[in-house]
Image (cartoon, rainbow, N blue to C red):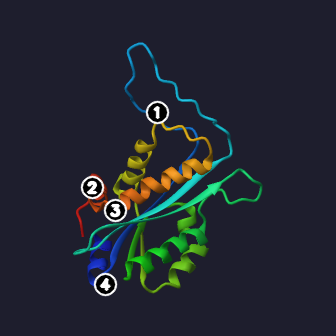
Amino acid sequence: MARGKRVARRLDAWICFADESGLTLRPARARTWAPRGHTPIVKVTGRGGRKLSVAGIVAYRTGHRPRIIYRTMLHRGRKGEPRGFAEPHFTALIDAAHQHLGGPIVLVWDGLPAHRSKKMRALIAARPWLRVYQLPGYAPELNPVENMWSSLKRGLANLAHGTINDLLRTTKKRLKAMQYRPALATGFLGSSGLKPP
């Protein structure tokens, strides 16, 4: 991590942390208020095969406010449909981040096979403005995006979405709200135990 910070300082680059997560129609459970003796019951459709994948980047740079960039992908359980983010999807996210941030990027992410594949290494090599570092497998808590997913899922707890499109709409709304609160992104970094660049 320290090496990535030195490279980012030398290149005047954004330090970007990336990760992906999945959501289903079955909501996470959380504590809630209810009259004594009346346990609240949340009814859900629970249809299998439908899933929402979200890939996100939290970007930091000295002298700039932190940024949150994300992409979503719906899985409706259809045959031949991609079940998760693959190399082209990650590349599109990284290219969008580069265009949005307007500067070189030092990317830090985990050891997902799609991140380490030969195809991904070739795509990274074709982008001179990009440097990539891998987080150790035993320390996912160092990634601030994990804290972003935790915050998102806490906000979705006990909500019953009728369809996968309802879940997509709510997720995008919550992530957009996070984008307008840079203090949250700073808090995600602080919760991971890392210091700002």
What SS does tag 4 mark? helix
Residue shown at the point (48%, 73%) measured from the top left = 94
Tell me the CA gap for discs 2 and 4: 25 Å
Q: Who is closer to the viewer here, 31 or 141?
A: 31
**Residue 117 in view:** no
Q: Quadrant of the N terminus?
A: bottom left
Tell me the CA gap for discs 1 and 4: 44 Å
Residue shown at the point (50%, 61%) measured from the top left = 55
Q: Which residue is mark 4?
A: 11
Tell me the CA gap for discs 2 and 1: 24 Å
Q: Where residue 187 is drawn, which disc sits there? A: 2
Q: Who is closer to the viewer here, 16 or 74?
A: 74
At label 4, counting other C-alpha atoms closer than 10 Å, the crowd grade (few under 14, some 14-19, many 20 or more) is some
Quarter assignment of residue 97:
bottom left
Residue shown at the point (38%, 14%) measured from the top left = 36
Quarter assignment of residue 143:
bottom left
Find out whether the residues at labels 2 and 1 contact each other: C-beta distance under 8 Å: no
Q: Amino acid at mark 3?
A: Tyr
Relative to residue 45, is residue 145 drawn left or right? left
Q: Amino acid at mark 1?
A: Arg
Q: Amino acid at mark 4?
A: Leu
- Residue 184 drawn at (x, y percent): 30, 56
Q: Is residue 189 above or below residue 40?
A: below
Of mark 2 and mark 1, the one earlier in the sequence is 1
Of mark 1 and mark 3, the one earlier in the sequence is 1
- Residue 39 drawn at (x, y percent): 46, 19
Q: Which residue is mark 3?
A: 180
Q: Where residue 29 is drawn, which disc sits there? A: 1
Tell me the CA gap for discs 2 and 3: 14 Å
Find out whether the residues at labels 2 and 4 contact each other: C-beta distance under 8 Å: no
Q: Who is closer to the viewer here, 187 or 128?
A: 187
Q: Where residue 159 is drawn, which disc sits there? A: none
